[in-house]
Image (cartoon, grey):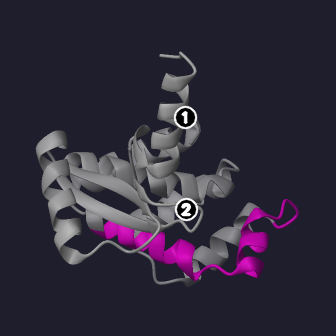
Amino acid sequence: MTDVAISYARAVFSLALERNIETEILKSIQGFKNSLGEEEWKFFLHPKITKVEKHQVLEALNLDNLTLNFLKVLIDNSRFALLENIIVAYLELLNDLKNVALVKVFTKLKLSETNLEKLEKALVLRLHKQVKIEEIMDQNLIGGIKIVYQGEVIDLTIKSLINDIKTQLTGGN
């Protein structure tokens, strides 16, 4: 994620926060992005379509003023291509505000509800935050679990454990 995307996310987030509509704005921006098909993306990114024409399309949509103005600023500054990264950065800001940690959990098979609850409780104790787990099935794993949170990786996969044993057997640290 670029610093530019983070800057735009912070700007729109601070305006939403002032109005106490930070969650609504996220939903609005995500909804707009999700409504765009390939042709619509091409339209908004096309350099020969004027900014005025792009603005007119946005104005025809049923968007709240903050979302509308935010999207116009992206177009005016030729930053529309950063929309997805801005949404990711905005979501991180919102989760920080709400003291929520988004954690990705990679497993070969879906975890049982019991194991998922145990993992969530352990992560809450470790991170001191509410936890939202995104479970990702990875068929390349032999077994075990890999947990990723804000760049930190806890790798308890069988492959990782085997590599650790190999390193120890060859005299590595």
Residue at 48 percent of width and 33 percent of height: 165
Residue 22 in sight from this viewpoint: no
Q: Residue at 12% of width from left, 56% of height from top?
A: 121
The front one of 89 and 61 is 89
Q: Residue 49 lies in what quarter of the image? A: bottom right
Magenta highlight: main SS: helix
Disc 2 crowd, CA 10 A, few/some/many (<14, 14-19, 20+): many
Q: Among all residues in the image, which is located at the extreme front?
A: 169
Q: Is residue 148 left or right of residue 96?
A: right
Residue 35 sits above or below residue 123 on the image: below
Q: Which mark is residue 71?
A: 2
- x%, y% of residue 19? 22, 57
Q: Nearest to the eye among marks 1 and 2: give it.
A: 1
Q: Are marks 1 and 2 in contact (CB under 8 Å)?
A: no
The answer to whether residue 27 is magenta is: yes
Q: Residue 58: say if magenta.
A: no
Percent coordinates x, y for residue 117 in the rendering: 16, 66
Residue 54 in sight: yes
Badge count: 2
Residue at the spot 76% in from the left edge and 63% down from the top edge: 45
Q: Mark 2 belongs to which amino acid?
A: Leu
Where's residue 78, x and y in %? 70, 50
Local secondary structure at mark 1: helix
Q: Residue at x 88, y 63 (%)?
A: 48
As measured in the structure, the alpha-carbon distance from the residue carrying label 1 to the one carrying label 2 is 18 Å
Q: Is residue 70 left or right of residue 45?
A: left
User: Residue tagged by mark 1?
Assistant: 3
Which amino acid is tagged 1? Asp
Secondary element at image label 2 = helix
Highlighted range, magenta: 24-49
Residue at the farthest right position: 48
